[in-house]
Amino acid sequence: MEHEEIQSPNTNLQKPRRERGEGRLWRIGKTWWIQYYVHGRQVRESSRSRVETVAKRFLKRRLGEVNAGLITPASIHKLRYENMRAAFLGDYRTNNRKSLYKNRAGEEQVCGIKHLDSAFKGYRAIDIPGDPIRDFISKRQAEGAPNSTINRSLAALRRMYFLAKKDGKLRDVPHIPMLKEPPARKGFLEHGDFQKLRQALPEHIRPLLTLGFYTGMRLGELKKLRWSNVNLFDGQIRLDPGTTKNDEARLIPLMGELPDMLTILRHQNPQGELVFTRSGKPISSFRKAWSRACIEVGLARLRCRICDSELDKKRYCATCTTKVPIGRALYEGLIFHDLRRTGVRNLVRAGVPERVAQAISGHKTRAVFERYNIVSERDLRDAGRKLEAYLVDNGVTSGQVQEQRTTERKLTN
C-alpha cells in the first residue's frame, strides 16, 4: 500500500511513496504503527516503538510472514459451518439452480446438505477437515448410504469451502476425499417388460410411463408438461427454454401410440393445464407404487440391509426371521430414469443419427450422451449375427465361423 506522506521536522522534502504491497507506516502520538493486508483484509498493528527504523523492520517481518502463510486473518478462526452453508445456499439462489428446493417446513435445501447439517452444525470451518470428515463418511456408510450419495454431500461441502476462499474468508481449500462410485447404471426396459409394467402400475401413472418409454424425457419434465407445449396436429412436444435441465428449448416428436394416448387424456381433462394429473391435481411422488409394480413383474427386488438377504413381497427376511421395516429394505432394480437410457438406445437402434438423437434427448454434451447410449447384450448379439453374415457373403462358410468360435472359447478357458 502507499506510504503516508510524512513531513520531516528538519526539511521540506517529502518521503517517497511505498510500492503497492509494501504496507504502510504512520505515527500515532510518538508510537509508530504498521498496516498490511492478509488475503485482502486490512490488518493494523502497533510496532510498540518510537523509532521509525524499528517499525520498518517489524513491518518487513510481518510481510514475510504473510507471504509464507504464517499469518491468517482472525476471521478464519471465527468462520463456522453455518456461515459457509448460508453462502452456499445464497449462491444457488442467485444463480437460480434447479436443485435448490424447499422442504415441508419451508426451509431451503440442496441434495446432500441435510446430513452435513446434522454432522457439522456448530463446527468451525478449520476444524472440519480430517477426522470429522472421515467420521462422517464412516457413519453414513454404516447407515447403508451408497458411495454416490455420500459423494453428493462431500461435493456440497467442498463447494462451500471454494466459495469461502473466493470471498476471502479462507486461505486454502482443504482436501476433501471423494469415494469411488460404481459404474454408470445399465438398466433398460424391453418392450415386453414395458407392457407388463404398465399393466401393474396404477392407472394415473401409466401415461407417464408410456411417454417416458417412447421419448426418454426426464421425470421432472413429464410432471411439469403443459398442454400448451403439446401440438397434436403437428405430432410434437416443444419444451420451452428454462423448463429443461439445461434451460434450452427442445423439440420431441410423437410416435407410435403417443398421439392417441394424449388425445384421450385431453378429452378426459379438457380444462386442465398440466398433461398428467390425478383427480385434477399434479402428480407428486409415486415411488411406492413404482417399487411395488416393478417387484411384482420381476424387474426389481428388495434386500435386507443387515444380512443382505432377498425379501419376499411382504418384506419378510428369512435370515432375520422378521418383517423388515421400510428403512432397512434396500430396493434394487428398475428406476424411472432407466426409461431415459432406454429412449436414447431405441433412437440409435432405429437408425436415427446420433446428433439428432442427442438433440431429442436433451443431452448437452457428447460425453454424457455416450453414457446413456450403453451397448446391451442384445446389441452385441446383433453385431455378431451381422459379422457372421458378412463373413459368409465374403466366402467364409458358416461351419468355418462356428469352428473359429469354438477355438476362441477353448483359448479363453
Image (tube, grey):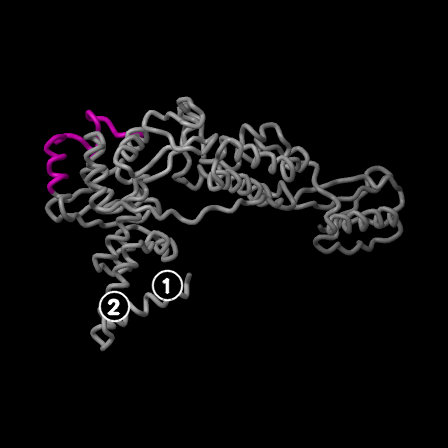
- Image quadrant where residue 285 sits: top left
The residue to which callout 1 is attached is 409
Residue count near mark 1 (Cα–Cα under 10 Å), binned few <14, some 14–19, many ≥20: few
Where does the magenta region start and end? 260-285
Element carrying mark 1: helix
**Quarter location, residue 386:** bottom left
Report x, y in % for residue 1.
Answer: 71, 50
Give the percent coordinates (x, y) of residue 124.
Answer: 64, 33
Q: Is residue 317 above or below residue 37?
A: above
Q: Amino acid at mark 1?
A: Arg
Of residue 101 and residue 382, the one placed in the foreground of this image is 382
**Left or right position of 167 against 323:** right
Q: Earlier in the sequence, mark 2 or mark 1?
A: 2
Front disc: 2 or 1: 1
Q: Is residue 279 magenta?
A: yes
Q: CA distance from mark 2 to mark 1?
A: 16 Å
Task: State if disc 1 and disc 2 touch (CB < 8 Å).
Answer: no
* Residue at the spot 28% in from the left edge and 35% down from the top edge: 294
The residue beneath circle 2 is 388
SS under mark 2: helix
